[in-house]
Amino acid sequence: MTILQGTEQEIVDYLLAAEKEKREVEKITTSYPDLTFEHAYKIQQKLIEQKEQEGLRRIGLKLGLTSKAKQDMMGVHEAIYGYLMDDMLAPEWEPLQFSSLIHPKAEPEIAFLINEDIQGTSVTAEDILKVTKYVAPAIEIIDSRYLDFKFTLVDVVADNCSSSKFIVGNKWVSPDSLNLKEIGVYMSKNSEVATTGTSAAVLGDPAAAVAWAVNKLGESGRGLKKGDIVLSGAITEAISFQPGDTILAQFADLGSVSFSSK
Ligand code: OOG
């Protein structure tokens, strides 16, 4: 698994420039068709380190491609993960600046607030629930840096899994008080239902999805830290929006979360 040091840096610069300049770019596998999944995570790591050098802070993890439907669409059998940085957390009460994004889409997800460090390679959903202080309704805004949101698995992993912004609702509840596998969700755009789903779409159980990610991190001696937020993966398809739109995600037992774009 050798990749030229310069190539990694070149790709990181290319992706960060696209994000900062808010423009779509051709996917990296067009120029580097031999990149592997392992390379993609190395590039992602370097991209996150560069963001840290620029003053941003890691505040958690996000999962992607957790639903069977999305995995089938991409022809893969595994979920993916990326990092959440402090500038991605958007408050519910402030309009989201559309002009700061490229071609964003919204997805309803369940957020986990982790209350104890956890690391390992055989972590279970039960272990995750034990270290989760609260779960909360969330909307993730994905904004792939690639042209028309078209990419391969390698491209999307290198691009920190399309991470861009996220909004967490204000109802935080203990995971003991609900059945996380059966939370019905609908998401509306301007008060019309845009999509519906249930939390079981996330690898059968969002806590199992978080356990999957912890086990993946564990393979390279990493884990989750007390205070981390984890977005456990999209429960429905992603919905596009435009300036002026209001998106609301309503979760059974968990309340709602919404944002407006301007
Ligand atoms: C990749 C990220 C998707 C999810 O929850 O499935 C994602 C994409 O851009 O589709 O975050």
Image (cartoon, rainbow, N blue to C red):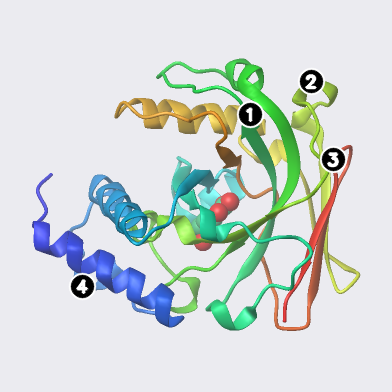
Q: Amino acid at mark 4?
A: Ser
* Label 2 neighbour load within 10 Å: few <14, some 14-19, many 20+: few
Q: Is the residue 54 above or below the residue 125 in the image?
A: below
The answer to whether 175 appears left or right of 218 in the picture is right
N-terminal-most mark, 2 or 4 = 4
Could you say where residue 75 lies in the image, as x and y percent from the top left?
45, 52
N-terminal-most mark, 3 or 1 = 1
Q: What residue occupies the far front of the structure in this picture?
A: 55
| Residue under label 4 | 31
Could you say where residue 244 lies in the image, as x and y percent from the top left?
78, 83
* Cα gap from disc 2 to disc 4, whole angstroms: 48 Å
Residue at 49% x, 71% y: name it: 149
N-terminal-most mark, 3 or 2 = 2
Query: What secondary structure is found at the residue carrying circle 4?
Result: helix
Cβ atoms at labels 3 and 2 below 8 Å apart: no
Q: Quadrant of the C terminus?
A: bottom right
Cβ atoms at labels 3 and 1 below 8 Å apart: no
Q: Amino acid at mark 2?
A: Asp
Q: Which mark is residue 105?
A: none
| Residue under label 2 | 176
| Residue under label 1 | 207
Q: Quadrant of the N terminus?
A: top left
N-terminal-most mark, 2 or 1 = 2
* Label 3 neighbour load within 10 Å: few <14, some 14-19, many 20+: many
